[in-house]
Amino acid sequence: MKDAKSNPLAQKSYSFALQIVLICKSLMNEKKEFILSKQLLRSGTSIGANIAEANGAISTSDFSAKISIAYKESLETKYWLSMLKDAEYISHEDIERLHPLADELSRILFSILKSTRLKKI
């Protein structure tokens, strides 16, 4: 597996996951919100975990499958962020900071997915 420090996508996803962990910690401790925050925690940290697995893939198909999962998790994370914002659990400032990061990860992952899938054809 490649070192995360030499992989910008791994760095971005790790940094994003850490921010998700911290916001979920705050939601659970301060707002006593446990259900939606756990969904956000699961999907938001899964992005980086699947990228890490993709970096250790044993084949192009394995790599593509893990990137696909990471992409889907990024979409789900954006959903939970929007839900928590609309339910007034997280601030406008937090959504303005986190949603663009999730969107950037989604776009990068989709681009990688598209290029790996095209190589199969």
Image (spheres, rainbow, N blue to C red):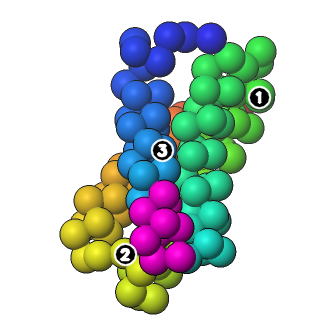
The amino acid sitting under disc 3 is: Ala
User: Residue 116's spot in the image, x, y percent?
Assistant: 61, 32
Give the SS element for disc 1. helix
Give the number of the disc on residue 17.
Answer: 3
Q: Is residue 121 left or right of residue 43?
A: right
Q: Residues within 10 Å of mark 1 (few under 14, many from 20)?
A: some
Q: Which quadrant: the C terminus?
A: top right
**Disc number at residue 5?**
none
Tell me residue 106's x, y (percent). Answer: 46, 51
Check if residue 28 falls in the magenta segment.
yes
In three-dimensional space, the C-alpha distance between marks 2 and 1, rounded to whole angstroms, equals 38 Å
Sequence-first disc among 2 and 1: 1
Of 29 and 101, which appears nearest the observer?
29
Q: Image check: 56 left or right of 115?
A: right
Three-letter residue code for mark 2: Ile
Secondary structure at badge 2 equals loop
Above or below for 10 versus 6: below
